[in-house]
Image (cartoon, grey):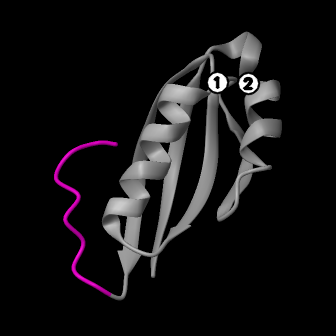
Amino acid sequence: MIIASMIVKTETEKVNDIVLKLQKLPNVTTHGVHKENNIIVLVEAESDDKLKEIGRYISSEFEGVYGTYPTFVSGDEEIGLDTAV
């Protein structure tokens, strides 16, 4: 199991809608908004590949998201995150 804290950088005017959508995703917990457009989330995933998939999904499927940026990653296995998701 991997647990990661991420910043989801968004368009300021869409931040509230994106928070609501993120709260509907399994294994994703929101922890507030920082500086108007940075959503703080905690993600739980079975592997580093699944973690990357979640980050890519949020970046590509949520209109108004600029990107997802891991800030802390910890897990039971060796984690191979060499690039931002």
Q: Is residue 41 magenta?
A: no
Residue 77 image point, x, y percent: 28, 85
Q: For the point 23% across and 58% down, which residue is it? A: 81
Label 1 Cα neighbours within 10 Å, binned few <14 / some 14-19 / many ≥20: some
Horizontal relation, residue 21 to residue 52: left or right: right
- Between 49 and 13, the one lying in front of the other is 49
Horizontal relation, residue 53 to residue 83: left or right: right
State whether residue 65 is above or below residue 58: above
Q: For the point 34% across and 43% down, which residue is it? A: 85
- Quadrant for the N terminus, please: bottom left
State whether residue 15 is above or below residue 85: above
Per the model, the C-alpha gap separating discs 1 and 2 is: 6 Å
- Residue 20 quadrant: top right
| Element carrying mark 1 | loop
Q: Are marks 1 and 2 in contact (CB under 8 Å)?
A: yes
The residue singled out by tag 1 in the image is 37
Q: Which mark is residue 2?
A: none
Give, as a three-letter code, the residue at label 2: Val
Residue 54 image point, x, y percent: 49, 50
Residue 76 image point, x, y percent: 36, 88
Mark 1 vs mark 2: give the one in front. 2
Q: Is residue 78 magenta?
A: yes
Give, as a three-letter code, the residue at label 1: Asn
Q: For the point 71% across and 52% down, which residue is it? A: 25
Q: In the rendered structure, which disc, 1 or 2, sits on the residue that comes first in sequence? A: 2
The residue singled out by tag 2 in the image is 15
| Region in magenta | 77-85
| Element carrying mark 2 | helix
> Principal SS element in the magenta part?
loop
Label 2 Cα neighbours within 10 Å, binned few <14 / some 14-19 / many ≥20: many
State whether residue 50 is above or below residue 9: below
State whether residue 50 is above or below residue 37: below
